[in-house]
Amino acid sequence: MDLSKIPSIKSHKSKKRVGHGIGSGKGGHTTGRGAKGQKVRNKVRAHFEGGQMPFYKGVPKARGFKSLKDTLEITTTQLNRFVNGETLSRQSLIKLFGSKSSKYKDVKIIKGDKELTKKLNFMGVKFSAAARETVTTLSGNVS
């Protein structure tokens, strides 16, 4: 007789027969479900609040889309309030035109409704084509 041909003998424990009397191994009377009530008699779905309006139905749906802009756009009309010949950096423009909670990485100057009338110098700022032309015609420095 070869040992490799002997069938394996594993212990087999019978499953607890829930709801089949006191001697079943699971208490018998309530079968591990506690006392009386809806949860004993049938299944109750998750997040069920007993007929009250469920929380998730009371909360409004999130609609729309908000993109987080990382570029602050400033029009040439807004730049007319500065003194003639002033130098403006990216940080100073973010401080003046950006809100406290916003975090902008770049500043871009775009053409506004009214023309720019003052000569201004810019450092580390992006421009639209029309805004760049407006600033350079007034002999402003763009870097």
Image (cartoon, grey):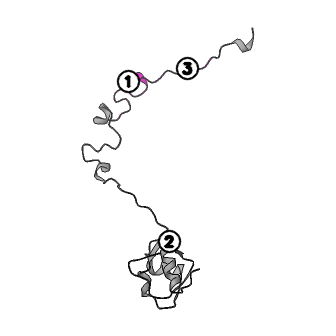
The crowd level at tag 2 (other Cα within 10 Å; few <14, some 14-19, many 20+) is some
Count of numbered circles on the image: 3
Whichever of callouts 1 and 2 sits on the residue coming sooner in the sequence is 1
Whichever of callouts 2 and 3 sits on the residue coming sooner in the sequence is 3
Asked whether the residues under the numbered discs 1 and 2 touch, taking CB atoms below 8 Å apart as contact, a structural biologist would say no
List the single residue furthest toward the top.
1
List the single residue furthest toward the right.
2
Residue at position x 51%, y 84% in the image: 137
Mark 1 vs mark 2, CA separation in Å: 70 Å
Give the image location of residue 83, x and y in percent: 47, 91
Give the image location of residue 38, x and y in percent: 28, 35
| Residue 12: mark in rendering | 3
The quarter of the picture where residue 81 lies is: bottom left
Asked whether the residues under the numbered discs 2 and 3 touch, taking CB atoms below 8 Å apart as contact, a structural biologist would say no
The crowd level at tag 1 (other Cα within 10 Å; few <14, some 14-19, many 20+) is few
Q: Is residue 20 magenta?
A: yes
Q: Nearer the viewer, mark 3 or mark 1?
A: 3
Q: Nearer the viewer, mark 1 or mark 2?
A: 2
Query: What type is the residue that disc 2 sits on?
Result: Tyr
In the rendered image of this protein, does residue 75 appear above or below residue 139?
A: above
Q: Left or right of 36: which side holds 114? A: right
Q: Which residue is mark 2?
A: 104
Image: magenta residue range: 7-34
Q: Which residue is mark 1?
A: 22
